Amino acid sequence: MATTPQAASKSPTIRRILREAAEISNSPSADYTAEPLESDLFEWHFTLRGVPNSPYSEGVYHGRIVLPPTYPLRPPSFRFMTPNGRFEANREICLSISGHHEETWQPAWGIRTAIVALRSFMITDAKGQLGGYDTTEAVRRRLAGESHAFRCATCGRTNAEIIRECEERAREACTSPSDEVQVPEELNLGFRDELEARKAQAQAEQQKRESERQEEAAEVAQLAEGFVQTGPVPAAAAPTPTSPLSPVAVGQRQAAQLGRTATVPQAGAISTNSPRRPSDEGVPVWLDRLIVALVVMLSALVLKVLFGV
């Protein structure tokens, strides 16, 4: 069932949202603006000018704010829709004023305070922040120049048109820079604490890497030491000097060598003194002839019987 305006006005959250929307409209700023959608009071769109004296100074950036049902007891969430080089486009941002850090949010803060803080956070370093984006200054300046032509499909206007209307309303309302909301000190302190924590974490990681490099160098040194010769290298044994032999001793040595050579038989040598055995030793020649004659006669007899010759 749809909620009637009278019933909705009784909700503390709705009353708070309507009051903040009226306050921003009645006290406009030339540097930013924000308003809820006509179809959804819990979704706001904001447009802000880049921080002066920074790579974003020439840029105009559009974004989206989503309020939780229990706002302002819980913080809103933020995301930029215009590419800017500091925050990723269309991704929720992790800040001390966003839903990622509910412990630092205070219900006394409002949407205007959050936008002013968000604008000041643009000049800080991302350092691995969720939704943060690191790039060169040249890229950020280029994106700043291109940001004026960005058109929100929901709002139906370009960033240049929206910020021009902001300037006109601020002139009509005679709003001075001194009337602008300042970033609460708690946010600055919280953000500085977060930066210090990140810095300490980075230093700890660097020390850990340095310790690992030192341990690795020590291991390499120990391995190299295992191959180093720690004891004295023994000198080569010097040849024992020998006294010259007398002619008689030389002759005796040569005779002994000749004697050893004569006693060693050569491989494959055939002795010529061994008697050669004849192939027909022990069988008379006439017996061989008799056997041959008998074989011939038997063969002839067999042929005669078989063929009747």
Image (spheres, helix red, strand yellow):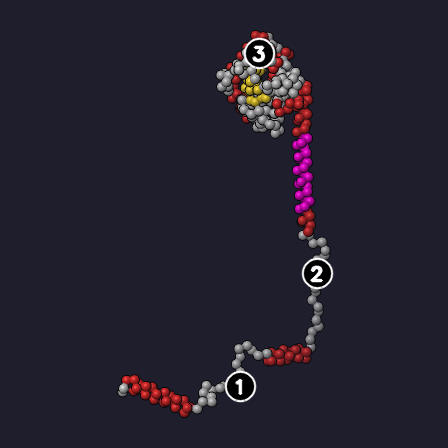
* Disc 1/disc 3 C-alpha distance (Å): 144 Å
Q: Position of residue 213 (x, y in %)?
A: 66, 41
Observer-nearest of 99 and 202:
99
Label 1–label 2 contact, CB within 8 A: no
Q: Is residue 51 shown to the viewer in this render? A: no
Task: State the SS at label 1.
Answer: loop
Q: Which mark is residue 7?
A: 3
Q: Which residue is mark 2?
A: 235
Q: Position of residue 220 (x, y in %)?
A: 66, 46
Task: State the SS at label 3.
Answer: helix
Main SS of the magenta segment? Answer: helix
- Can you say whether 293 is above or below 113 in the image? below
Q: Is 123 a magenta residue?
A: no
Q: Amino acid at mark 1?
A: Asn
Observer-nearest of 60 and 131:
131
Q: Which residue is mark 1?
A: 273
Q: Amino acid at mark 2?
A: Ala
In this view, which residue lies farthest toward the right?
A: 231
Residue at the spot x=71%, y=54% of the render? Answer: 230
- Can you say whether 227 is above or below 170 in the image? below
Magenta residue span:
199-220
Residue at the spot x=70%, y=65% of the render? Answer: 238
Task: State the SS at label 2.
Answer: loop
Q: Position of residue 279 (x, y in %)?
A: 46, 86
Q: Amino acid at mark 3?
A: Ala
Locate residue 62: give its quadrant.
top right
Q: Is 200 a magenta residue?
A: yes
